[in-house]
Image (cartoon, helix red, strand yellow):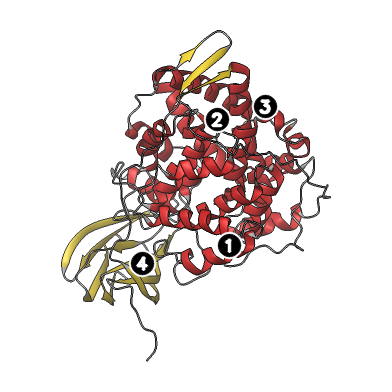
Amino acid sequence: MKPMIKIRLFLSIFTLIISTEVFSCPLLNDKKASTPSEKMLTKDVLMDKVKGGWAGKTIGCTYGGPVEFLYNGTMIQDYIPLKWNNESIKWYYDNFPGLYDDVYVNLTFVDVFDRLGFKAPADSFAIAFAHASYPLWHANQVARNNVLNGIMPPASGSWLNNPHADDIDFQIEADFAGIMSPGMPNSSSEISDKVGHIMTYGNGWYGGVFVAAMYSLAYTSNNIEFIVSEALKTIPAKSTFYQCISDVIKWHKLYPNDWKQTWFECEKKWSSDIGCPDGVFVPLDIDALINSAYVTIGLLYGQGDFGKSIEISTRCGLDADCNPSTAAGILGVMLGYSKIPEVWKRPLLGVEDRLFSHSNYSLNKAYKVSYNHALAMILEKGGKVGDNDVIIKCQKPVAVNYEQSFEGHFPKEKISVNKSLNKEMDVEFNGNGAVFKGSVQCPDNEYVADVEVLVDGQNMGTIKLPVSTQDSRKVDIYWIYKLKEGMHKVSFNWLNPDSKAQVYLGDAIVYTDSSKISFLK
């Protein structure tokens, strides 16, 4: 998730690269798929699958990079070319290495496991994540600000402390949990519980749990429909996430040859983002629910074909680099690195020893470390590791705990405040909650504005607002939920004003406790 202005800039450059024909061969599914009690793999096959996961993720991220968030509320039409050639991955390594945040944030958590072992507490992952050098956005950046201010997981990811809790962030960072848990989706869920609640909750967390489970199951099955349906069993059936993915599975059966019809059905029923302040009342939808649906569409309609799967996931639009990245990583595990078609794998040559941006990990190092973690996890969970083979104690998926973000909160209106704070400001709204967007500007990049907030006269404390160019920045100025329905007044009091600084309040998203809102007067 990079700022869209950067994507547009690099898109114009990237499209100058000459395209080559993209092809791959379909993998036939085993129609009698089931979860075995044990699965034997050679160590070579295990390593091949680990490599396939990380390589696939990198390939998919690159393929969709030029169109990330350029197509919101619409699919990418067939006549729009998606470029790919032998220089595609190297070009991004050289010119825009930040594209691979999907990978290098994952590797932060891989490294914590490698340094501290499987018993590393959630706080260790949170601290490593919060102090990493890379820029972050949405749920990740809110979580970073929370952790730096002493709000640790799981509170750092709760929707009460993070308006972006349902965003895609953990969905695109959970790959490592599945890669290190071959055939053990419940073990990947345990890891997801520890790490995913740093930055997400509810559907945002479920996106990562679901993805990690699919990676895990891809070690022991080559039936993509089975992998999807079994992974969904890790999600509570009463959640909207479960219902959405169940709908995709149902629509795939109704329209087996028409992914676009399933896409349209998803748009009609599941495309309303109610949490992310940047995605409410606009076509942008960075919610994990709809983006996980696009991953699922790509996997089901791709039928095990590597190229077809990532192309469909990309053409679904929205977070069009993250979704094919996830789909390609899962297929990379299922197929193994050696069976990823050469046209897709060839661009990796020459970069696998290069470090990812903001990381001391290369792909080759990620392969080795995750392979060692997978061996250790097999032993940890009762399997066996021999000289040449491993025996995995396979797990039947069990649903994680139920949780729901923004319960009883529905977007009502957007208020345009659009004013700079001149020491004091009052803003009134009618509803049960609100999120105030804005920014802090100052030539002194170390400046932090202290702003006292009162709601209906009650002092809610002082919020610290770093300059908006800082990595410790606060994504949204202020938010409050769970108020009694009615009129409320939020008062902002700037305690340490600086003549060179500006605290700007933009829009406010107002919530109500009823989903039945009529806009007809």
What's the residue type where badge 3 is placed?
Answer: Asp
Which residue is under mark 2?
219
Q: Earlier in the sequence, mark 1 or mark 4?
A: 1
Q: Do the residues under discs 1 and 4 have CB atoms within 8 angstroms? A: no
Count residues near mark 2 (Cα–Cα under 10 Å), then give few for <14, some for 14-19, many for 20+: many
Residue 486 location (% of width, % of height) = 21, 77
Compare marks 2 and 3 and give the one earlier in the sequence: 2
Residue 329 in the image: state x and y as whole percent.
59, 38
Mark positioned earlier in the residue sequence (2 or 4): 2
Say what amino acid the circle numbered 2 marks: Tyr
Sequence order check, earlier mark of 4 and 3: 3
- Residue type at numbered disc 4: Phe
Residue assigned mark 3: 353
What residue did someone put label 4 on? 436
Q: Name which quarter of the figure residue 458 lies in.
A: bottom left
Report the side of 327 relative to 416 (left or right). right
| Whole-number angstrom distance, CA of label 4 to CA of label 3 | 44 Å
Closer to viewer: mark 4 or mark 3: 3
Using a 10 Å C-alpha cutoff, classify the residue at mark 1 as few (fewer than 14 neighbours), some (14 to 19) or many (20 or more). many
Mark 2 near mark 4, Cβ–Cβ under 8 Å?
A: no
Please report contact status of discs 4 and 3: CB closer than 8 Å, yes or no.
no
Q: Which residue is the extreme one toward the front?
A: 32
Q: Which residue is mark 1?
A: 263
From this view, report whether residue 142 is shown above or below residue 417.
above
Local SS, label 1: helix
Q: CA distance from mark 1 to mark 2?
A: 28 Å
